[in-house]
Image (spheres, coloured by chain):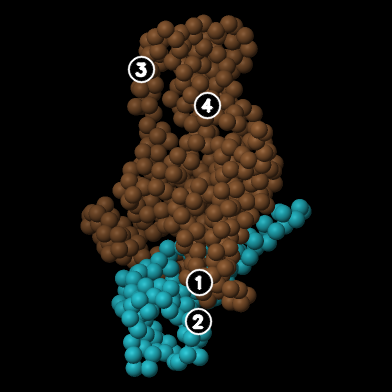
Chain colours: A brown, B cyan
Amino acid sequence: MAVPTVIANPLNLSGLSLPPQVVLLCRLLALTLLLTNHQAQIQTPFLPFLNVFDILPPEPFQFALRAALVIGSLGLLFTRRIRTFAVIAGAAILLAVLSSRGYYGNNKTFVALLLILSALSSQYGPPRLIHWQLALVYFGAGLNKVLDPDWQSGQFFHHWATDRLENPVYIWISAQLPPLVAAKLFCWTTIGAELTLALLTLFPRFHPAVIWGSGLFQSGLLLFTGDPFNLFFYSMQASLFAFARWPENRITVIWDGSCGFCRAAKELLQKIDFDPIFNWRPLQSNAGDQFGLTKDQLRQALHAAGPGWLLNGYSAIRRMLIHLPLFAMTIVAAIALSPGPQTRRTIVALVLLYLLPISNPIGNLVYGWIARHRHELLAGETCELPEKS
Amino acid sequence: MHWRIALGVLILALQAFAIVRARFVDDRYFCWAPFDQQTKYEIGVMIGNEGLAPSQVQKRYRRPAEGVDNRSAHHLFDIITRAERKFEKWGRSRVVVRYSVNGHEEREWRYPQ
């Protein structure tokens, strides 16, 4: 029986009505909403921002919003109608926010607007509406803090980290310095980071800096508190995909076609690369010529080339994994389903360790060992591939 | 300009307006001020001569009778004021909120003021 064309594999990002990175953004939000059972937080109207919500029947309205959120999230994950279901899920959260001061929250409003602005984005070109949205969030947050005397003096941070969080790292640092100096440093670093990020989001050439800066900033916050602040951590990180330069053409991966272990690894990656985004070329096919790579260089390590970059070995594998939606979805699921703050911290720390160059020495060491022994790892599986492109 | 982009720009413009508005009012709705204040509070409600239990306070305001709010204290006062205006047809109440912002000395806010 033919599968209806509306059904989609959640790990397939291409050929849809929005750019792949925006589809991934929406699907990560949908996954978060479902895994955190967010629909249960939606209330009946309570002191709404717009009086019209007071005249609606409370329970049916609440049920409709909850149903719309679940249907919208499932539709985002499992159908090709990304725009439609982004509007449904986003509107459900936005209506829930507008209809209840009890439910109102910055994190929920941000998710709603991300979904709606994604749906309004163009199929081609960069999703500028989302860039401007993040600029507004950082600008609003930075402006409010810089004008607040408790942020200027460090009082906010000192009280929060000492009395509320009882964070041992901050308490120790603070004790080594004159009163409020550490707190002032944290407050002004936060203000500086937020206002700088607001500015950088507006300039495409600084978008890699936005991805790293905002990603590290939000991860640091989670490491410090152990708290994702409801949907905030997930949505801030997901929004960074809108700043990623997604390859227009497939990423060329040059591998050793004479190695059984390499073939097994390639087949595994092909199984989870549904778009597909990788164009696998054996080194025996002279695929390295267009990149000026000799066969000797190619035999040393796997090479991957995308728009404006050429990497090898551990760095190439890392870059390839980032482009697989399964990678981000697994991380989101692991954090969302974490039993507590310590597990969340551990997951985020491990992901950061993996993504940052700090892991290169050990990554290169492990990769180098595997590369040197690759012909022994799957004995009997080796064969030379014919020289063809 | 395509209608979708125009609608998106309108949504962003409304937020820019909310950021400017926040400079002239006490509340911080829709202006992207998450986690900017730590408000420790305790709400006491008297209706006639009878005080409400914490569970009744929670039901009345959809906020715990005591706790810490990560937003402007004025959001709490706004919720109480609006809720009391709504409920006053069933009898006037007196509300006292003892609160402390960012670890400063405790203060009191009352309804009616």
- Do the numbered discs 1 and 2 sit on residues whose CB atoms are within 8 Å? yes
Between marks 1 and 3, how big is the CA–CA gap?
58 Å
> Looking at the image, is mark 4 or mark 1 nearer the viewer?
4
* Residue at image mark 1: A101
Mark 4 belongs to which subunit?
Answer: A
Q: Disc 4 on helix, strand or loop? A: helix
> Looking at the image, is mark 2 or mark 4 nearer the viewer?
4
Q: Position of residue A364 (x, y in %)?
A: 38, 23
Q: Position of residue A374 (x, y in %)?
A: 40, 13
Q: Disc 3 on helix, strand or loop? A: helix
Q: Position of residue A249 (x, y in %)?
A: 64, 29
Mark 1 belongs to which subunit?
Answer: A
**Point 39% across, 75% down: residue:** B58
Going by the numbered disc 1, the residue's amino acid type is: Arg
Which quadrant of the figure has residue A253? Answer: top right
Q: Residue furthest front?
A: A1
Disc marking residue A369:
3
- Left or right? Give the position of A29 relative to B47: right
- Left or right? Give the position of A182 relative to A95: left
Mark 2 belongs to which subunit?
Answer: B
**Point 43% across, 41% down: residue:** A331
- Do the numbered discs 2 and 4 sit on residues whose CB atoms are within 8 Å? no
Q: Residue furthest bottom?
A: B48
Between marks 4 and 1, how big is the CA–CA gap?
46 Å
* Residue at image mark 4: A271
* Residue at image mark 2: B82
